[in-house]
Amino acid sequence: MPELQFPLLRHPIRWTGASFLGLMIWVFAFLPFMPKEIWAQPEKLVLTVIGFNIGLAFFGVGFALAIPCKWFNRWMALVFIGMALEFLSLGLIYLLCHPSLKGQIDPSQAWRILNWLIPPLYWFSKGLLVLVSVIPTRGWIDYVCWRMRQKRSSTPPPFLRQE
């Protein structure tokens, strides 16, 4: 872990809590405007929102913790290459299936194309989501390891030293 200079990197748990509270305020501000169907099971709604916002807060702060690390640029390059390949394959699906939408070819041809291309694209998308999730997880792991090393050594971290 590099020298911690930013407040976010000094106190990531505080920032996670602050972002969680901000997300919760945002959600509960719009709850009165939700359709009545959503209120059928309010306990599930509230627990789902809390769980999603906790995950989103940890994801965002973990992503910020990962930015100064050496491996971050390589992982982001992989993510962007994967996203580009996914968008190219979606464009290919559109180009191959567009004539059937206009009625120029038989729709069964489009279904054959879709049955051939959609399953690999689905699994590729899942792999891309896992790859994106590894980045904040690795940021948190690096931060925890850095904190453990700092606690073992008796010297205070650089951002707490008073000169």
Image (cartoon, rainbow, N blue to C red):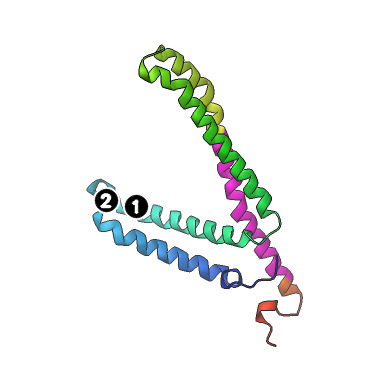
User: Is 46 covered by the magenta stretch?
Assistant: no
Residue 84 vs residue 127, the one in the foreground: 84
List x then y, in percent, for residue 151. Answer: 71, 74
- The residue to which callout 1 is attached is 45
**At 38% across and 62% down in the image, what residue appears?**
24
* Quarter-of-image position of residue 61: bottom right
Image coordinates for residue 13, horizontal then vertical, percent? 55, 68
Q: Give the farthest residue toward the top.
A: 106
Vertical comparison of 76 with 105: above or below: below
Disc number for residue 6: none
Location of mark 2 (residue)? 39
SS at badge 2: helix
Give whichever of 32, 93 is nearer the camera.
Answer: 93
The residues colored magenta run 124-149
* Of callouts 1 and 2, the N-terminal one: 2
Q: Quadrant of residue 43?
A: bottom left
Task: Locate residue 74 relative to residue 153 in the image: left or right.
Answer: left
